[in-house]
């Protein structure tokens, strides 16, 4: 979808290049995050795609067309653009702001009106805001309007320059979730610039880690960057807690779980006690036709013949197949028994996860 | 408060007899002002936009208009007389030249104050340079530009009175008459009406500005809410 | 061209360089009445402006003075003062001119002093108070030095306006270079009128330049931009202040 080949940018006639001989491919529908310390040329790289900055040399192809051969104004109208300070036009209402690019490309009023309604729904914006001016909105609201405005003509490519950088952490988290939600549905090709590695890990399909002078140190999916940093720079940039961060990216369904101590309601108490002792956890899950009913231990079973005679106790916390390993780890360390019980939808029992199993994942 | 003194200063009967002349001079005053500010704006606007886009021209442009602004009005009128005579043209050339510095400085200041992020976003969305100027920069600069127009208008209204010395003058006609005939009533009528005209013009322009910039009011309301 | 040449001849004619009606005498009169008016106006307006800025009380008064000052035509002030003072004060045109110039000079000085002090960073002031400076010390050691460029800018505006308006004083038989203009005008000696006009214009520009230099020398240097410019005559109004 987007292809940068040997792209360089030098500001002024001398001095070090801001971006030197950078090549990268971005696939359609993928979210690529450019991340790196300040001065690494990540914003410069992004702005060369819509020619807000002209490359000194190299070629940039978007959707099969060389951007350097296109009229920059036309090019920009076809690429969504969101910046940190948003830059809403303060003298236009929210609805007018969203209609900016549709008007530039000459849509009629009816079509614009319909599109504004759609965008309002997509971004879950309050209808009432449409006739206000940007100065009357909160930072989070403005940011969502900024995204809505960039989506207005449904451009296949979106460029986002630290779009959530100016809001507080709680709002930022919510905006990131919403971004993931919308991206899931709209499947845009997104180039996203941030200096926040955690944000990159959270939203990226692939991360390009840039070093001074626009050198790509590693370009890989987040999980791979965390598991296998290409060099010292990446390792230092990713920072401590690398293992923990990676756990957040792996779903429980992606690894094998252990079967754990399981008994059926029809099992005898002797059988149940044997199972409990074998696993040395002090309890066993009660599963009937694949459905998890709860757990039993020796005390509950005392004086009974069959497991089914006792009322199984409920687990206070489960982990689902969709949970991340990080959530599983949290469940393990906070549970009394140092084990996380994994279920799928409809309380289907899948197995258990132990600290040992997860640490094996971190090491691998 | 001191009725006898006021009575001695202001000859109300005279004022009553002069109502027609006052009307005529008032109209002339408004005309001279409107033409001066209008022409001044037409000259200032392209110069200011040019100086805004090409920074190195700002200093020379304001230097030249600054010199014009500094030359005393009477001196400027006198120096024009050999060329344009005792005419409206002489008056207007002088008056216009005083509006230039005020207008150019304010237009440039207004344009410079447009937030960089708004310009960047507009460029990123595919506005052309001309579109950015006309539908982003100028609307946002409007409050400062209008402030400049207001100052220029109020200043010009005051300066028009001086053109009485070259046979024009609007309400300055009465001021000159008061001076020449040692007749305070005429001077006071001229000065007071001139001030009143300035206040009214300033207020009207402020209303125009409010009408043209509804977003500024919205933000302000929020700020005080 | 003839006109310009005649004007040059008049300016360089030695007979115009001496005697009670010579250029030096008129120039001195002009400078003297302008300086005195500016001095007296400063004496009155500066302390009031500083006090309003320092205490934050009387702001409405300061803003009103500024607005009236801008709207009041200088010619109008002269027109009112002259007939009213005639016979009350000695001399013919000198005192009316002085009083008119004095009144004219007040608003810019007062307003700039007030705005200059008011613009001083409130946190800096608070820090100074926190260190134990008295109100008087804050004003003298902090507010006045920091407001100095704006105060001088106000003086500059007033001085240029006073020098220009002193010319008009001649209409009311006042002193100064305006005499050449009015007398030349009345006697149809355009070279003389224009000569006077040139002298007045040069004097006004020199006044502007002199105060401009003073203002620059008082403006603190900021690392990136060299010297910061401060507003001056015909200055930039923000929508809030205008």
Image (cartoon, rainbow, N blue to C red):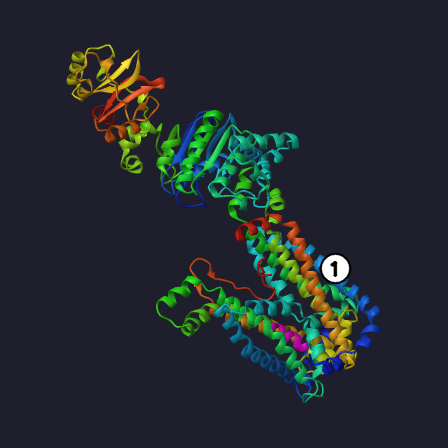
Q: Name the residue under label 1.
A: B35
- Dividing the picture into quarters, in which one does residue A355 lie? top left
x%, y% of residue B143? Answer: 61, 54
Q: From the top left corner, tell me how far across and down residue B1 is, in percent.
A: 69, 78
User: How far across and down, in percent of the image, does residue A263 sit?
Assistant: 23, 14
- On screen, residue A92 versus residue B177, left or right, reads left
Left or right of residue A222, residue A339 in this image: left
Comparing B132 with C57, the one in front is C57
Seen at 77% across and 64% down, the residue is: B89
Residue in view at x 49 percent, y 64 percent: C119
Q: Helix or strand or loop: what does disc 1 sit on? A: helix
The region drawn magenta spans: C160-167
Residue C179 visible in this rendered orientation of the protein? no
Residue located 29% across and 12% down the image? A288
Which image quadrant is residue C66 in? bottom right
Does residue A348 show up magenta in the picture? no
C74 up-or-down from B151: above or below: below
User: What secondary structure is the stretch in magenta mostly built from?
Assistant: helix
Chain under label 1? B
Residue A1 coordinates in the image, percent (x, y): 47, 26
Specify the quadrant that holds the N terminus of chain C. bottom right
Please state which of residues C163 and A103 is positioned toward the viewer in this rendering: A103
* In front of the other: B192 or A262: A262
């Amino acid at each position: 979808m987007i292809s940068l080949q040997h792209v360089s940018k030098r500001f002024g006639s001398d001095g070090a290049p801001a971006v030197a001989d950078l090549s990268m491919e971005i696939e359609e529908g993928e979210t690529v995050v450019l991340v790196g310390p300040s001065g690494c040329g990540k914003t410069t790289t992004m702005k060369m795609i819509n020619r807000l900055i002209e490359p000194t040399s190299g070629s940039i192809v978007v959707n099969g067309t060389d951007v350097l051969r296109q009229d920059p104004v036309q090019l920009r109208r076809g690429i969504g653009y969101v910046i940190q300070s948003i830059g809403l036009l303060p003298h236009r209402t929210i609805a007018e702001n969203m209609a900016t690019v549709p008007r530039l490309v000459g849509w009629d009023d009816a079509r614009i009106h319909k599109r504004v309604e759609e965008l309002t729904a997509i971004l879950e914006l309050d209808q009432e805001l449409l006739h206000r001016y940007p100065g009357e909105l909160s930072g989070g609201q403005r940011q969502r309007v900024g995204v809505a405005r960039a989506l207005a003509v449904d451009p296949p490519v979106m460029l986002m320059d630290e779009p959530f950088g100016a809001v507080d952490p709680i709002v930022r988290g919510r905006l990131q979730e919403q971004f993931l939600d919308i991206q899931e549905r709209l499947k845009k090709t997104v180039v996203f610039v941030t200096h926040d590695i955690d944000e990159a890990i959270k939203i990226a399909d692939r991360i390009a880690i840039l070093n001074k002078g626009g050198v790509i140190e590693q370009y890989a999916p987040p999980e791979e960057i965390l598991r296998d940093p290409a060099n010292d720079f990446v390792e230092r940039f990713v920072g401590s807690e690398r293992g923990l961060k990676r756990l957040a990216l792996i779903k429980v369904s992606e690894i094998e779980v252990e079967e754990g101590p399981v008994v059926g309601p029809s099992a005898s108490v002797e059988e149940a006690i044997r199972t409990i002792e074998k696993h040395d956890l002090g309890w066993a899950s009660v599963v009937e036709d694949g459905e998890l009913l709860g757990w039993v231990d020796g005390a509950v079973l005392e004086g009974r013949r069959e497991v089914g005679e006792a009322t199984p106790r409920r687990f206070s916390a489960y982990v689902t197949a969709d949970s991340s390993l990080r959530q599983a780890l949290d469940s393990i360390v906070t549970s009394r028994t140092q084990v996380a019980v994994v279920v799928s939808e409809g309380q289907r029992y899948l197995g258990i996860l132990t600290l040992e199993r997860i640490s094996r994942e971190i090491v691998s | 408060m001191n009725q006898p003194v006021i009575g001695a200063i202001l000859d109300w009967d005279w004022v009553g007899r002069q109502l027609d002349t006052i009307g005529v001079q008032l109209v002339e005053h408004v005309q001279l002002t409107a033409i001066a500010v209008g022409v001044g704006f037409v000259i200032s606007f392209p110069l200011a936009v040019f100086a805004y886009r090409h920074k190195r021209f700002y200093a020379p442009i304001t230097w030249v208009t600054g010199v014009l602004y500094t030359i005393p009005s009477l001196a400027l009128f006198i120096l024009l007389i050999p060329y344009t005579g005792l005419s409206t043209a002489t008056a207007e050339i002088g008056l216009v030249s005083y509006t230039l510095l005020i207008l150019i400085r304010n237009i440039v200041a207004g344009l410079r104050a447009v937030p960089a992020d708004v310009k960047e976003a507009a460029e990123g969305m595919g506005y052309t340079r001309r579109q950015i100027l006309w539908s982003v920069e100028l609307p946002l600069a409007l409050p400062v530009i209008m402030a400049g127009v207001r100052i220029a208008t109020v200043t010009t209204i005051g300066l028009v009175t001086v053109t009485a010395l070259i046979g024009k003058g609007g309400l300055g006609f009465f001021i000159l008459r008061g001076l020449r005939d040692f007749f305070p009533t005429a001077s006071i009528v001229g000065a007071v009406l001139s001030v009143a005209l300035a206040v009214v013009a300033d207020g009207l322009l402020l209303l125009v500005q409010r009408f043209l910039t509804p977003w500024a009011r919205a933000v302000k309301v929020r700020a005080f809410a | 061209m003839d006109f310009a040449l005649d004007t040059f001849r008049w300016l360089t004619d030695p007979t115009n360089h001496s005697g009670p009606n010579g250029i030096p005498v008129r120039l001195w009169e002009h400078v003297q009445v302008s300086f005195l008016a500016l001095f007296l106006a400063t004496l009155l307006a500066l302390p009031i402006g500083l006090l309003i800025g320092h205490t934050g009380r009387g702001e409405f008064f300061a803003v009103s003075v500024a607005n009236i000052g801008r709207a009041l035509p200088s010619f109008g002030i002269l027109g009112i003062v002259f007939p009213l003072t005639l016979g009350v004060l000695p001399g013919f045109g000198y005192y009316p001119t002085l009083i008119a110039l004095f009144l004219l000079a007040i608003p810019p000085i007062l307003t700039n002093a007030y705005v200059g002090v008011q613009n001083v960073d409130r946190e800096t002031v608070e820090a100074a108070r926190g260190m134990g400076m008295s109100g008087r010390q804050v004003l003298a050691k902090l507010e006045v030095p920091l407001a100095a460029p704006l105060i001088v800018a106000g003086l500059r505006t007033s001085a240029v306006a006073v020098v220009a308006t002193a010319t008009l004083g001649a209409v009311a038989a006042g002193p100064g270079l305006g005499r050449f203009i009015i007398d030349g005008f009345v006697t149809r000696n355009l070279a003389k009128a224009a000569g006077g006009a040139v002298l007045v214009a040069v004097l006004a520009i020199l006044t502007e330049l002199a105060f401009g230099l003073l203002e620059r020398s008082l403006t603190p240097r900021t690392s990136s931009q060299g010297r910061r410019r401060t507003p001056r005559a015909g200055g930039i109004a923000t929508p809030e202040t205008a």
